[in-house]
Image: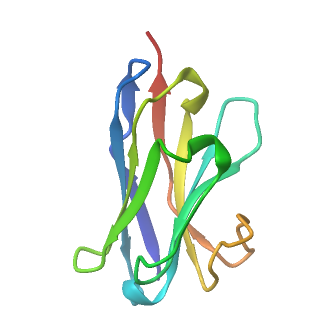
Amino acid sequence: QVQLKESGGGLVQPGDSLRVSCAVSGRTFDSYSVAWFRQAPGKEREFVAAISWNGGTTYYTQAVKGRFTISRNNVKSTVYLQMNSLTAEDTADYYCATGAHYYSDHEAKEDDYWGQGTRVTVSS
């Protein structure tokens, strides 16, 4: 069974940096893309970033381009999201997902696997 576990969330101040991690188990990690989504209070879930199986292709939503970086370590079966210059608008629960597609359309699919989420709060 595929399992994803996010970690690294917390409370930070505007302008700070934070790195969240997604550990994946139960499948051939280096064969699948992994994506990050987030859901802010009272808002719908939105795509944040995705990375292809070998890290050669990445996608970002416009709101985080230049501030967030997605990366992966296939030896550790972990995907990271480095978040810099955080603002209050980045406050959300962050979820990682994996599926047999590239997330090039910034959309999740019905048969994607999901983690339980990690909360990021940006506040002074």
In the image, 24: left or right of 105?
Answer: left
| Residue drawn at (50%, 78%) of the image | 52
Q: Position of residue 16 (x, y in %)?
A: 35, 26
Residue that extends furthest to the left in the rendered view of this protein: 75
In the image, 21: left or right of 31?
Answer: left
Picture layout, residue 107 above or below residue 12: below
In the image, 33: left or right of 18?
Answer: right
Picture layout, residue 84 above or below residue 24: above
Q: Position of residue 31 (x, y in %)?
A: 45, 90
Count of picture labels: 0
Q: Position of residue 115 (x, y in %)?
A: 50, 60
> Looking at the rendering, which quadrant does residue 6 occupy?
bottom left
Nearest the camera: 77 or 15?
15
Chosen colour scheme: rainbow
The C terminus is located in which quarter?
A: top left
| Residue drawn at (52%, 78%) of the image | 33
Residue that extends furthest to the front in the rendered view of this protein: 66
Nearest the camera: 65 or 45?
65
> Looking at the rendering, which quadrant does residue 41 occupy?
top right
Picture layout, residue 65 above or below residue 23: above
Res. 112 visible in picture: yes
> Looking at the rendering, which quadrant does residue 49 occupy?
bottom right
| Residue drawn at (37%, 31%) of the image | 10
| Residue drawn at (46%, 47%) of the image | 68
Res. 35 visible in picture: no
Residue that extends furthest to the top in the rendered view of this protein: 124
